């Protein structure tokens, strides 16, 4: 998922890994180390924090070796380097030493920006490692993980995995690795459910799906299980809001093929098919009532009420009733 610039040689003299996603930062480092050790099995790897790199020490670390061995120097939290050490690093970047790969890890932002600018001006290889904050970004990550492992997974399976695992990229990557190792052929939603059923049942999206389908008892059971396993109430209200809004959007849209509606509404085609099935009992008044219930629940879980759990239960029941208003 980490994006790279046009200088895509892991053995470039300087690699700048920018962002706050730990998994991607670690992968950027691992790629350089693996390339260096492929070129020289005896590569010397030094992994340093900012406080370990003192003024003058970079010159010592980059001095020629008697055995002319290849080196990889990793500097973490480069934004925290002292002013004098930053001067040393800038001078080195302008005239790097052969057979040495310097990897600078920086979160981005204003602190230490001068070092970032200097590395970019010197045409350092840059790897972007942004924090994934949106569900769509995590979905893209999962798809790319399957693709990188040479495996095929359905869109529904990718979504189910994100719903079940959550926002931790390390856990998502581990889940993809496990599924590809254990399962032959295309990985579908049933496979994900079989492996991660306990976590999927605790998902906020499972609560929302059961509620908008009018299955009140199952929605309440999923809600209680989610809360018992530590799912934040605010995530549940968010999932409920997304589910009801999807119903409203598709109800108001003109008929058409899933691909056309997907472009119009900003949803993947597979989700269009799922929402079409969920919206059969809905009316415009039902959508309005459900949205009001979600708004009230959201206020309740964010401090506007005394009992967040009751606020969520009330919203789930109201949504499930609204889903059956046409039946």
Image (tube, grey):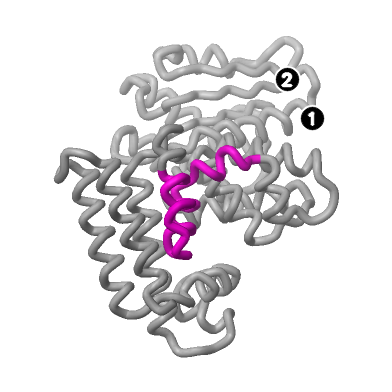
Q: Residue 102, how many percent across, how many down?
A: 57, 29
Q: Quadrant of the C terminus?
A: bottom left
Does residue 253 appear left or right of residue 8 in this picture?
left
Q: Position of residue 276 (x, y in %)?
A: 52, 76
Q: Which residues are magenta?
A: 196-223
Q: SS of the residue at dot 1?
A: helix
Q: Residue 189 versus residue 20: which sits nearer the camera?
A: 189
Does the magenta segment cover residue 255? no
Residue depicted at 33% across the width and 20% down the height: 82
- Give the SS element for disc 2: loop
Q: Would you say residue 15 is visible in this rendering?
A: no
87 or 223: nearer the viewer:
223
Q: Which mark is residue 39?
A: 1
Relative side of 279 to 61, left or right: left
Left or right: residue 73 compared with residue 222:
right
State whether the magenta stretch is mostly helix, strand or loop: helix
Q: Disc 1, disc 2: CB below 8 Å?
A: yes
Residue 212 shown in magenta = yes
Estimate how packed mark 2 is, as few (under 14), some (14 to 19) or many (20 or more) residues with alpha carbons within 10 Å. some
Q: Is residue 193 above or below residue 250?
A: above
Asked if one can make out residue 241 in the rendered structure from this viewpoint, the answer is yes
């Amino acid at each position: 998922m980490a994006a790279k610039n046009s200088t895509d040689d892991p053995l470039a003299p300087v690699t700048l890994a920018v962002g706050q996603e730990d998994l991607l930062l670690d992968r950027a480092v691992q790629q350089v180390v693996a390339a260096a050790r492929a070129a020289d099995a005896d590569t010397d790897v030094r992994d340093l924090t900012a406080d370990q790199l003192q003024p003058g020490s970079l010159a010592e670390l980059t001095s020629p070796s008697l055995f002319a061995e290849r080196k990889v120097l990793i500097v973490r939290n480069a934004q925290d380097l002292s002013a004098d050490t930053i001067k040393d690093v800038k001078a080195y970047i302008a005239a790097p030493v052969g057979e040495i790969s310097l990897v600078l890890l920086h979160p981005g932002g204003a602190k230490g920006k001068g070092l970032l600018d200097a590395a970019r001006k010197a045409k350092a290889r840059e790897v972007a490692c942004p924090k994934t904050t949106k569900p769509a970004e995590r979905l893209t990550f999962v798809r790319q993980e399957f693709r990188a492992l040479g495996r095929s997974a359905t869109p529904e399976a990718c979504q189910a995995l994100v719903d079940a695992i959550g926002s931790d990229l390390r856990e998502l990557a581990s889940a993809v690795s496990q599924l590809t190792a254990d399962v032959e052929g295309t990985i579908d939603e049933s496979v994900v459910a079989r492996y991660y059923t306990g976590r999927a049942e605790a998902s906020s999206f499972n609560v929302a799906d059961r509620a908008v389908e009018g299955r009140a008892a199952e929605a309440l059971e999923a809600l209680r299980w989610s809360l018992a396993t530590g799912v934040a109430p605010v995530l549940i209200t968010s999932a409920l809001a997304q589910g009801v809004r999807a119903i409203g959007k598709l109800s108001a849209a003109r008929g058409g093929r899933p691909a056309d509606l997907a472009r119009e509404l900003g949803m993947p085609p597979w989700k269009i098919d799922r929402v079409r099935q969920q919206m059969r009992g809905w009316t415009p008044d039902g959508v309005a009532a459900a949205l009001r219930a979600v708004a009230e629940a959201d206020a309740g879980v964010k401090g506007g009420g005394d009992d967040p759990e009751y606020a969520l239960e009330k919203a789930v029941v109201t949504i499930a009733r609204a889903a059956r208003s046409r039946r």
